[in-house]
Image (tube, helix red, strand yellow):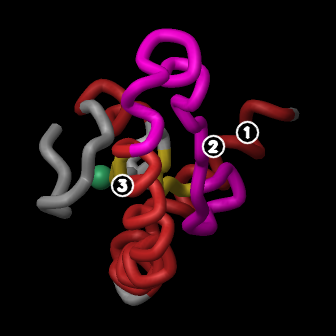
Amino acid sequence: MACRYSWCETPADMHAEDPSYHTRELGHGMKLTVENSGMPGTNWMPDWSEWWIDKPEDVETEYESVIAMLRDLPKNYQEFREALMNDPQFTEEVATMQAELKGVKK
Ligand SMILES: [Zn+2]
């Protein structure tokens, strides 16, 4: 199923399992995501080793764009968070998922 958020990059099959899991990639391994608790958060898996080992000559140029990504992170995260927290449908999706998680744990 397609997501109602145009920026959301969660694959359709994952959305079918967890409709509350909205994501947005900012590049360099930085991903805006929804935590298990239902709160918007971030997940960063930097691709440094790829540069140091495979493309050391790119480190300087890539580093500039990492800095740019980090500089814009607070603004992008805030937009992400507000879009979700101001959306009653998201609140419902989280409630549904939390209820399901509790059901699994019994
Ligand atoms: Zn989504």
Q: Earlier in the sequence, mark 1 or mark 3?
A: 3
| Residue 74 visible (yes or no) | yes
At a point 41% along the width and 83% down the height, the residue shown is 75
Q: x and y percent of residue 5 in the render? A: 19, 63
Q: x and y percent of residue 102 in the render? A: 77, 45
Whether pointer 2 and pointer 1 mark residues with C-beta atoms closer than 8 Å, the reply is: yes
**Amino acid at pointer 3:** Ser
Crowding around mark 3 (Cα neighbors within 10 Å: few <14, some 14 to 19, many 20+) is few
Q: x and y percent of residue 32 in the render? A: 47, 57
Foreground pick, 90 / 70: 70
- Location of residue 101 by image quarter: top right
Alpha-carbon span between mark 2 and mark 3? 40 Å
Q: Quadrant of the N terminus?
A: top left
Residue 103's label in the rendered image is 1
Q: Earlier in the sequence, mark 2 or mark 3?
A: 3
At a point 38% along the width and 66% down the height, the residue shown is 68
**Amino acid at pointer 1:** Gly
Crowding around mark 2 (Cα neighbors within 10 Å: few <14, some 14 to 19, many 20+) is few
| Residue 88 visible (yes or no) | no
Residue 65's label in the rendered image is 3
How many numbered dots are placed on residues in this image?
3
Residue 100's label in the rendered image is 2
**Amino acid at pointer 2:** Glu
Report whether 42 appears left or right of 79: right
